Image: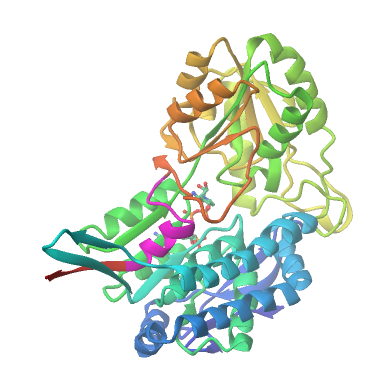
Amino acid sequence: MQIIENYINGQLVAPRAGNYLDNVEPATGQVYSQIPNSCQQDLEFAVTAAQQAQYSWANTSLEKRAAILCRLADLIDANAEDLARAEAIDNGKPIAFARKVDIYRSSANIRFFAHAGTQFSSESHAMENIAINYTLRDPIGIVGCISPWNFPLYLFTWKIAPALATGNVVIAKPSEVTPMTAYLFSKLCIEAGLPAGVLNILHGSGASIGGPITTHPKIKAISFTGGSATGAHITQATAGMFKKLSLELGGKNPTLVFADCDFEETVKEVVRAAFSNQGQICLCGSRIYIERPIYEQFKQAFVELVEKLKIGDPLDEQTQHGALVSEAHMNKVLSYIELAKQEGGTILTGGKRHQLDGRCANGFFVEPTVIEGLTNQCRTNQEEIFGPVCSIMPFDDEQQALELANGTQYGLASSVWTNDLKRAHRVAKQIEAGIVWINCWLLRDLRTPFGGVKSSGVGREGGLEAMRFFTEPKNVCIKY
Ligand code: NAP
């Protein structure tokens, strides 16, 4: 059984209190490793290490910081196969997906922000014949980065990279449910020569170590990705502490399919948008609105394609649909399918736990599920399920489509499928979401702002937004 360790002050160390949690492989339901359940003592050790590293890292030249980060990205690439396998085992996602999406993006994140660090500049504002203002953008100091389980290494690096590139020292916590790649990553940090204390990785539950990180007085900013309820909890717990918060939260994203779309391409992409990563992506389109003239035809083609998704062992190269991340999460998803039935929904396909043979006989698999006949107001269409469950509904015109799309508390992402350029612009402007994809989904340029409105979050990640979040602007005004 593999024992995971914390990464503090440049070393792999056991938790001070000696407490561990079981780590389960979702595809088999078996415990296969143990992770530290870190506590306040571990946090104090990490904060001291970070304080000691803070000045020297902030004053390390941009080129040197970038070189270390690029070395780290190269090491991820060199170990991509092992990391993809580890992610598939730890999370339940298909290995082909982990390789192509998770691990590819993890090194891309680090390389992107290594370069961004060398290109980042600040503003100056001249007051004609009177004065000049220039803005210093200094690192904040010690920052906390807390990430979820759906893209374990991908979202972990998405936060850590800009924080380090801008000269901060970091205390990071991956999800207790998927700690393995963060642990392997800590070994790569040592190999890359990241100075001791610059990054500290503490494993453990949200209650035992996540909470203490968010409220520690020496940690001045928190970058959090996770559920909206946890985001609300962090906001309350840190109220009055004047910390900088970036909150990337849940979604219940609409997909709007207009009758003039490219039919076949749209069906294929809407299936991908609904079921990639077993529907466990904050950006997945789980509310699918289809213009009435093509509703029946779309429904038939959509269900046909969903039924072709190959459910299987995440380690099988052919698998397209793996296990859900945990038994508790599987039960939550199944309970929403039951709720949908009670709310009057008809299951068009799926609807059950999926049973595999052999090594995966006890795995947490749920069939890709399509439901119709629900109202927009029902809980199934209002609450984030975060699994392989989507609901399809007809609409009659653009105005109604917009009202349905905007009719939840969430506002993270959306996709619109149409060949009418004017409509695409009109709808994009009126959708309440941080991200609108037109005739595509999950096409990402790392320079663009990433995040949501309403209950989907506060602040933006990506490109300059992240560089600005992790720096403190100070204006200097010089009179001529
Ligand atoms: P979660 O339960 O909110 O947990 C997220 C992270 O916060 C985990 O590391 C968790 O630790 C930790 N945590 C839990 N309670 C905490 C507390 N009181 N204080 C500080 N940290 C705490 O979310 P999840 O179930 O892992 O992830 C799924 C959610 O993330 C979905 O809602 C999804 O939409 C959202 N998400 C959003 C984005 C985005 O960019 N907007 C991206 C991906 C996912 P433990 O795991 O150890 O409990």
In the image, residue 108 lies at what x, y percent? Answer: 63, 65
Is 214 rendered above or below residue 375? below
Q: How is the image coloured?
A: rainbow
Q: How many marks are shown on the rendered structure?
A: 0
- Is residue 208 something that shows in the picture? no
Query: Considering the image in quadrants, where does the C terminus appear?
Result: bottom left
28 and 171: which is toward the camera? 171
Is 277 rendered above or below residue 431? below
In the image, residue 301 lies at what x, y percent? Answer: 80, 23
Q: Classify residue 390 as left or right of residue 316.
A: left
84 and 169: which is toward the camera? 169
At x 34% / y 66%, what residue is drawn? Answer: 122
At x 21% / y 61%, what residue is drawn? Answer: 126
Say if the magenta span includes residue 297. no
- Picture quarter containing residue 68? bottom right
23 and 171: which is toward the camera? 171
Q: Classify residue 467 as left or right of residue 243.
A: right
Query: Considering the image in quadrants, where does the N terminus appear?
Result: bottom right
Magenta span: 457-471
Say if the magenta span includes residue 464. yes
- Picture quarter containing residue 47? bottom left
Report the residue that reaches farthest toward the front: 129
In the image, residue 244 lies at what x, y percent? Answer: 30, 62
In the image, residue 38 lies at what x, y percent? Answer: 47, 76
- Is residue 387 something that shows in the picture? yes
